[in-house]
Image (tube, rainbow, N blue to C red):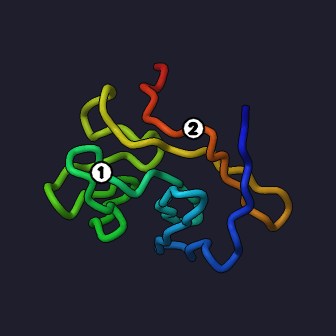
Amino acid sequence: MSHWVEIPASALPASGGRGLFRHAGRCVLLVNVDGTLFALDDSCPHAGASLFGGKLDGRFIQCPAHGLRFDLASGCLAGRRDLGVARYPLEWRGDACFIDLSESTFQVPTP
């Protein structure tokens, strides 16, 4: 069952920016790459480090603790499809952005 929650406009990052959205004990990293918004768990699966401070390189974010790189679009670890962080679907309804928080674990994407 979907659990859509509105993200306050003040929490939405501008193009090239990032922000954190906290709701019901979850911390979600929001990243805006050239006008496209991505939402991932903020915690690296290796040791739980926050991805918020990681280096952005196009559509990839690098964990500041150990250097693992994650694809913002899929949540997958670069070069692998079996390890990653949860990615949350986003939906725009007019000027409001909603996030589906029902997905709480990494799921291997289908090819």
- First reached walking from the N terminus: tag 1 or tag 2: 1
Q: Which residue is drawn at 61% across and 72% down?
A: 12
Q: Which mark is residue 26?
A: none
Q: In which quarter of the image is residue 65?
A: bottom left
Q: In this view, does 32 lie to the left or right of 64?
A: right
Nearest the camera: 89 or 45?
45
Q: Residue 103 carries which label?
A: 2
Task: Give the labeled residue for mark 1.
Answer: 44
Amino acid type, mark 2: Glu
Q: Residue at x 57, y 38 (%)?
A: 103
Q: Is residue 6 left or right of residue 42?
A: right
Q: Residue furthest left?
A: 66
Q: What element carries label 2?
A: loop
- Percent across and percent down for residue 30 are 51, 63
Q: What element carries label 1?
A: loop
Note whether residue 29 is visible: yes
Q: Residue furthest bottom?
A: 10
> Is 15 situated above or below 39?
below
Contact check, label 1 and label 2, Cβ < 8 Å:
no
Q: In which quarter of the image is the N terminus?
A: top right
- Percent across and percent down for residue 74 are 45, 39
Nearest the camera: 80 or 98?
98
Q: In this view, does 93 lie to the left or right of 59?
A: right
Amino acid type, mark 1: Cys
Nearest the camera: 61 or 2?
2
